[in-house]
Amino acid sequence: MSSHYEQANAWLESHPVVWLAVTVAFPGLAYTASGMWINNQSFVDAAPLGVVFGVVFATVLFLGRWLLYD
């Protein structure tokens, strides 16, 4: 593992609010963009599902890390 990745990971773990925002934002935006591109939805239609997907993704990731590593 590179030292830059380790430093970024340590920083994100010490800032849980930023970790949550990043973990929700990236998958949520990807889901929204794919809904707009593949399903030809408007942003208003795709965004709520993107937010829900991001929140569910972050929750599953958090529970998985919590159960497996702690």
Image (spheres, rainbow, N blue to C red):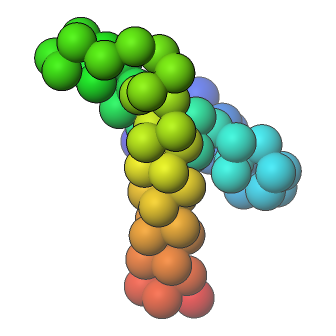
Residue at x-position 45% and y-position 37%: 50
Residue at x-position 51% and y-position 79%: 63
Quadrant where the image shows the C terminus: bottom right
Coordinates of residue 51 in the picture (x, y in percent): 54, 42
Quadrant where the image shows the N terminus: top left
Coordinates of residue 57 in the picture (x, y in percent): 43, 57
Relative horizontal placement of residue 1, taking residue 62 as reference (left or right): left
Coordinates of residue 14 in the picture (x, y in percent): 82, 55
In the rendered image, is residue 27 in sight? yes
Name the outermost residue toward the left. 38
Coordinates of residue 19 in the picture (x, y in percent): 69, 48
Please state which of residues 24 and 52 is positioned toward the viewer in this rendering: 52
Quarter occupied by residue 42? top left
Please state which of residues 14 and 38 is positioned toward the viewer in this rendering: 38
Residue at x-position 53% and y-position 67%: 59
Relative horizontal placement of residue 58, taking residue 20 as reference (left or right): left
